[in-house]
Amino acid sequence: MNTKRSLISKAVTLAMTSGLLLHTNAFAQEADTEQVDASKDDKSFEQIVVTSQKRVQSISDVPVAVSVLRGDQIESAFANNVENLQALVPSVSFRKGTTTRNSALTVRGIGTISFSIAAEPSVATVVDGVVLGRSGQAFADLYDVDRIEVLRGPQGTLFGKNASAGVVNITTKDPSQELTGSLSTEFYQDNEYRLKGTVSGGLTDDLSASLTVFQGKFDGYIDNVYNNEKVNGYDREGARAVVVYEPTNDLKVKFISEIYSADDDCCADLEGVSSGRNPDSKAAPNSETIADGIDLEQRQIDHDFESRTIDDHSAFSVQVDKTIGDYTFTSITAQRSWENTEFREGDFTSIAGDSDQPVFGVPFQLHDVGEQEWSQFSQEFRVASNLAGPFNFLAGMFYWNMDSERNFTRDASCQNNNLQLDQALTFYAQNNLSGDALTDALSDLDAYANSLGVTCNANDIVSATAFMSTEFNNWAVYGDGTYDLSDDLRLIFGLRYTDDEVSYTHRRISNDEYGRRGVGVRPATENTDAEGVVDETNLSGRLGVQYDLDQNQMVYATYSQGYKGPGFNVYYNFNPENDGRPIGAEESDAYEIGYKYASRDLLLNIALFSTYIEGFQANNFDCSDGACITRLTNAGDVTTQGVEVDFMWNATDNLTLIGGAAYTKAEIDEFNCPIETIVNDDEPPRCDTRSGDDVPFSPDLKYSLSAEYFMETEHGFDVYYNASYIYTDEQYSDLPGNVGGFNPHSLLPDYSMLNASVSFSFKDDAFRVSLIAKNLLDESYATTYSGDNFRYQIPRDADRYYGVAFKARF
């Protein structure tokens, strides 16, 4: 505790002499030679660059629907993590899980939501050219970002598997040759603070380096009435070092090393509709049934087991760029590891497991502890032409390997609502008795249970542990290029060949002496010892045309294919009969027509799209085990189509407007029926009752508008006003049932949000002080329906709160 006070005390002392970095102008001052080359008086949008095609290009020249969030823009919005992308980019939605490993991004309504360790995302996440094995690796704090590019639609040619819906491409800052540094602090209500320090500069004429350190802490915003403590907070810290060696103009070597750790008592599910499990609790919601609506004002839980996530990341990469003649050769070698431990309250009440009566007449206990380790290695070689002639290309080879191990233990109340105790004792007797003793035990199982002193009530806690592992091996060769048919017209083409291999092992062992079944705990009769492997190849391509209307505007039309690799539904209660079958690849075909305009004062992008996804990997409803659950399968085929608009406009010398809108219809074409309806080996029948229903996390309409106004004063300081408004339409958080129709609990209401800040800049922005207001409208909302007809995720930003930030730079 003393350490914490000392740290805050030092931070406040430093913060009182600090301020924030200049919003747009500082970006221009700090950008490297590959970034916007604009002076303090020239904020030209023509110069915004992206690497969405794995080479540095102006955003207005790229025939891809891409949204760009610059580092200064992210800082001005005080958007501290990838989760905030859903507010800044209308085409993106975020599924909030109880841990980073089961949260997910969706783009244009398409994404993979799964608990399986042998399935991969549909939206690829790339950091400094390195593809991350899981999106959860990127759901950390943004503290050294130069820009984030969101590529919408399939990007299989250049980014390979796991890009069937899109790509989030994050680029961090390079060190400067000139010695610079900054210190920033943010303080918010409810004891939340964030500290960041950066130093950057040249070590020699050829060598430059930077170091950024970060720390953040938050007590939480949810009251646990069980122990009068706050939850849904965090305790995080990280450091990132970059070294760039550039001895000549044609050689650049960049080393990046990063460590990050988080201990979050997050993310507890809130009871948005009465569960009936503890109606006398102070945390009982005001909504009795869904007809009353979701209690979006609920900020209390009554949990005797704390949901918590512990993350530890480490990463190292080396990128070498060598130019020889008209070609640039690039090598990126990377190693990353991720350790994730989750503690999950699964009964959602403090009185569960106390009763000596059988479930389900009384509340049951269910507590989970899961540990997982990921280790990935990737190597990419590529060569790019210099964009000088009529034919330009980029070609490469890619290799990627990821190993994962997970141990998961569930402790839960014994379950005996269908003679499960008799089944367990029969198995126990057969393995421990013989002869007459066995015959006597099996003839009177009640007497046998009494002789052992065995019962099966809510306070009889049983457990089982699953030991799971997976390995992914992927290699690919690819090429992408353009050919100028004339000065204004060019042909776009690309192709990628991919080879995927996925293998798994699963061994689940009952920890109970008698092998009893628990709520969500398989008995000893269902112990597993399974393994499997699937290997698949894919050829994806893209073809299109691009036409320059004049120097400032162009149109394009493309057809592209996406590919998401095969997998297995490997999770705690893995059933070898159903889950042991491979899940086939998810493939997509996309058509897109776009228009782009770029001048000094205006950047405008418009895209019309239609994407068909075959073999959509989703949690399909399945009742084959006697209880309806969701199981990851090739659920069926879906289509997403719509229109997107985004713009940046320097309306005046002092006013900048940034906005975007997305109208998306992501719908089910036809879905496969659940496994229990299949009576032969022919192609499974279709569940056409769900045709036309929405895909989860695909709001029809999202839009945002932000404005920054700069005002000079005659009093030795300048003022920056910043405001943003975001609207998100209603959306479903689950697939519809097998017979059609959505669970009404899964419909998340629409919401609006208004954020604002005012900043005071001193001494040419050497110091900045900002006052911050989040959710000024105080409109509450839920990001996710988690299940059981009552569980919801309600974020911190669903309440109005205030903060202050300081930054100093030299």
Image (cartoon, helix red, strand yellow):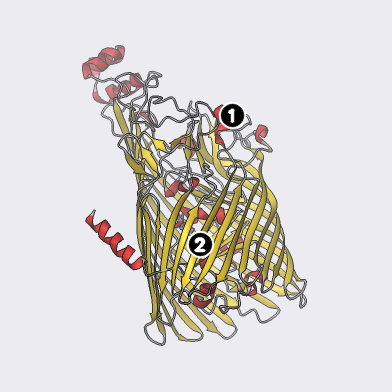
For label 1, the crowd category at 10 Å Cα-Cα, with few meaning under 14, some 14 to 19 and many 20 or more, is few
Q: Which mark is residue 665?
A: none
Whether residue 311 is visible to the viewer of this picture, yes or no, is no
Q: As drawn, is 621 to the left or to the right of 260?
A: right
Residue 751, image x, y percentages: 58, 44
The answer to which quarter of the image holds residue 290 is top right
Query: What residue is disc 2 on?
Result: 758
- Above or below — where is 184 with respect to 567? below
The answer to which quarter of the image holds residue 441 is top left
- Residue at disc 2, secondary structure: strand
| Between 488 and 798, the one nearer to me in the picture | 798
Query: What residue is disc 1 on?
Result: 677
Residue 121, image x, y percentages: 52, 51
Q: As drawn, is 405 to the left or to the right of 672?
A: left
Residue at 70 percent across and 63 percent down: it is 543
Type of amino acid under label 2: Val
The answer to which quarter of the image holds residue 292 is top right
Whole-number angstrom distance, CA of label 2 to CA of label 1:
60 Å
Whether residue 233 is visible to the viewer of this picture, yes or no, is yes
| Between 123 and 351, the one nearer to me in the picture | 351
Residue 9, image x, y percentages: 29, 61
Q: Earlier in the sequence, mark 2 or mark 1?
A: 1
